[in-house]
């Protein structure tokens, strides 16, 4: 494939490659009928997904589809921003089905290299997002994405990527089912001077898998999450004051935790090479907290604290906030890789998020659109 021939990745991700449906609704019918988390996230089984999908068809509701998943969204937006083909690569599992073929084609059309493992007998992961104004309620059936074992990841063509990478991005949704693979990837980053970035991902993930999520946060050079995720995380470690966001970030920044998995000889984390990216090397550890329309908070370096205002946007132009956090991090990490400073990179993140929330789903505008963002 062209992507394989011309790729020289600087940003890779471990995540759940998903196929997204965005459904426009005018009320809370689905939330009330199926017990969904209003303006939140919920993982469901295949039977429930099938019933809800049939209900959507029966109601003849308007919907659109696009590639999805936290990490995959971030990589696609990064490629749009930087316009450097195939500088990103996604690792994860899909099914051996039609949706996997469609997903691979669409993601590679967005200039992301796909290194999917095929999980036989499982459907490609699917999400449905119910959009009602600025409220978005997300459900997901991970399907094939729920298993990406070390042996699927540790093949020569995947491991060779670490020789050029600057950043590896890992989503919290991934570590709830494949923590060993995530730790293996972190060990490769440590050996090769690659920055480790981690997304807290969701409150319900922290409820069920706080040991795994907090351990990964303790290993990462960059941690990103929203206010709800940070305050939920603070419930599970010895935070001095959960009401003070600066203290929550400070305590998480200095967190040291034992591994939740059995020690293995191929998961060594005691040697860490010098980080390739100068901005991260000079400022780690970097913590980012998004707060919707309120300022982005950042704690970095020797406890430098930064607040960056979010430019006001009229509610009438907001179509879907589902991928706001994913696109924010795409802009931020694009700035970091381009060796812009922390504040400039946060501003890039805010601009990317502002662009994406004016689309349905994580839909990339055409290059000749009104959106002009320079990295």
Image (tube, rainbow, N blue to C red):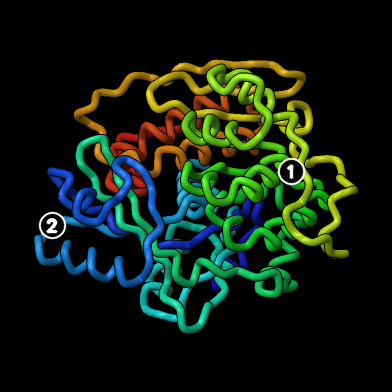
Along the line of sight, which residue is nearer the eye, 55 or 98?
55
Residue at screen point 30% across, 35% down = 370
Report the residue at 77% width, 19% height from top: 302
Q: Residue at x 54, y 65 (%)?
A: 114
Q: Residues within 10 Å of mark 2 (few under 14, many from 20)?
A: few
Most extreme residue toward the bottom, as rendered?
121
What residue is drawn where x is 44% and y is 70%?
A: 143
Let me know if residue 254 appears in the view: yes
Helix, strand or loop for disc 1: helix
Q: Which residue is mark 2?
A: 61
Looking at the rendered structure, the secondary structure element under dot 2 is: loop
Look at the picture and state if 39 lies above or below 94: above
What percent of the width, then of the height, locates residue 284? 74, 30
What is the crowding at mark 1: few (fewer than 14 residues within 10 Å), some, or many (at least 20)?
many
Question: Who is closer to the viewer here, 76 or 202?
Answer: 202
Compared across the picture, whether 370 is left or right of 114 comes to left
The disc at residue 260 is none
Residue 301 as seen in the image, left or right of residue 110:
right
Identify the image quadrant of the N terminus. Answer: bottom right
Nearer the observer, 121 or 67: 121
Mark nearer the N terminus (2 vs 1): 2
Residue 240, located in which quarter of the rendered image?
A: top right
Q: Quadrant of residue 298?
A: top right
Q: Quadrant for residue 52, please give it.
A: bottom left
Q: Is residue 79 visible?
A: no
Residue 128: horizontal and vertical position, in percent?
30, 57
Residue indicated by mark 1: 219
């Amino acid at each position: 494939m062209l992507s394989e021939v011309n790729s020289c990745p600087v940003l890779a991700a471990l995540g759940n490659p998903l196929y997204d449906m965005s459904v426009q609704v005018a009320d809370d019918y689905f939330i009330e009928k199926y017990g969904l988390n209003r303006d939140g996230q919920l993982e469901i089984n295949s039977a429930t997904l099938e019933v809800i999908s049939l209900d959507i068809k029966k109601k003849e509701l308007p919907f659109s589809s696009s590639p999805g998943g936290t990490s995959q969204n971030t990589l696609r937006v990064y490629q749009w921003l930087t316009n450097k083909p195939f500088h990103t690569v996604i690792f994860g599992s899909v099914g051996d089905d039609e949706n996997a073929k469609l997903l691979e084609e669409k993601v590679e059309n967005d200039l992301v290299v796909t290194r999917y493992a095929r999980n036989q007998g499982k459907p490609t992961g699917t999400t449905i997002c119910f959009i009602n104004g600025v409220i978005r309620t997300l459900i997901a059936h991970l399907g094939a994405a729920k298993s990406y074992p070390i042996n699927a990841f540790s093949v020569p063509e995947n491991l060779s990527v670490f020789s050029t990478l600057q950043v590896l991005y890992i989503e919290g949704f991934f570590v709830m089912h494949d923590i060993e693979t995530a730790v293996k990837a972190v060990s490769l980053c440590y050996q090769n001077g690659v920055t480790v970035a981690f997304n807290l991902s969701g409150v319900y993930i922290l409820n069920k898998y706080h040991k795994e999520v907090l351990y990964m946060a303790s290993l990462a050079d960059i941690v990103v999450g929203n206010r709800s995720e940070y305050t939920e995380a603070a419930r599970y470690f010895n935070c001095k004051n959960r009401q003070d966001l600066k203290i929550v970030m400070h305590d998480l920044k200095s967190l040291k935790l034992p591994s939740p998995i059995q020690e293995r000889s191929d998961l060594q984390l005691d040697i860490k090479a010098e980080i390739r990216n100068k901005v991260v090397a000079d400022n780690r550890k970097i913590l980012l907290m998004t707060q919707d329309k309120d300022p982005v908070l950042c704690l970095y370096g020797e406890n430098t604290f930064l607040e960056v205002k979010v430019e006001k946007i009229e509610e009438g132009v907001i179509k879907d906030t589902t991928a706001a956090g994913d696109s924010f991090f795409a802009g931020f990490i694009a700035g970091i890789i381009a060796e812009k400073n922390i504040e400039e990179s946060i501003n890039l993140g805010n601009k990317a998020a502002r662009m994406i929330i004016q689309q349905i789903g994580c839909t990339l505008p055409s290059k000749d659109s009104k959106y002009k963002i320079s990295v």
